[in-house]
Image (cartoon, grey):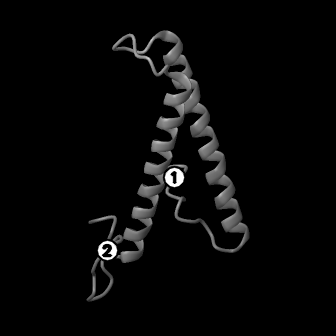
Amino acid sequence: MSFLTGARPTGPTGGVNTDKIEMAITELDTITDFFNRMVASCHAKCITPRYTDGELNKGEMVCIDRCVSKYNEVQKKVGEKIQSRGAAAGGGPGPGASGLGF
């Protein structure tokens, strides 16, 4: 049983559900874009451009932890807002309703 075809084929077609594939691709693109933006932003903010060690120092680690935490919190709030607007418009839960918070 595949998540792309649904629970069970109900008719003779039983093919791949293209709507679910498109939603999965959209969600993956959204998560990838979010991750890339977060990494670039937190890296620029927390890590000096001049590398002196092969490891992060304590201050850089704390800064990265806080930065990533803030990004995740904002993403969660944005996702909740989008879902509430979609539900208020009568559209029900949108593509981000997978429980991932995106």
Q: Nearer the viewer, residue 17 or 42?
A: 42
The residue drawn where x is 50% and y is 49% is 100
Q: Is residue 22 above or below residue 72?
A: below
Label 1 crowd bin: few (<14), some (14–19), many (20+), radius 10 Å: few
The residue drawn where x is 26% and y is 89% is 12
Q: Residue furthest front?
A: 50
* Comparing labels 1 and 2, the label whose residue is closer to the camera: 1
Label 2 is placed on what type of residue?
Answer: Arg
Q: Is mark 1 on a helix, strand or loop?
A: loop
* Image position, residue 87 (x, y; %): 68, 67
Residue contact at pointers 1 and 2, CB within 8 angstroms:
no
Label 1 is placed on what type of residue?
Answer: Gly
Q: Nearer the viewer, residue 68 or 52?
A: 52
The residue drawn where x is 62% and y is 70% is 92
Task: Give the residue number, with chain letter if any, for mark 1.
Answer: 99
Q: Nearer the viewer, residue 49 or 87?
A: 49
Task: Give the residue number, with chain letter if any, for mark 2.
Answer: 8
Q: Is residue 81 above or below residue 15?
A: above
Q: Is mark 2 on a helix, strand or loop?
A: loop
The residue drawn where x is 31% and y is 74% is 8
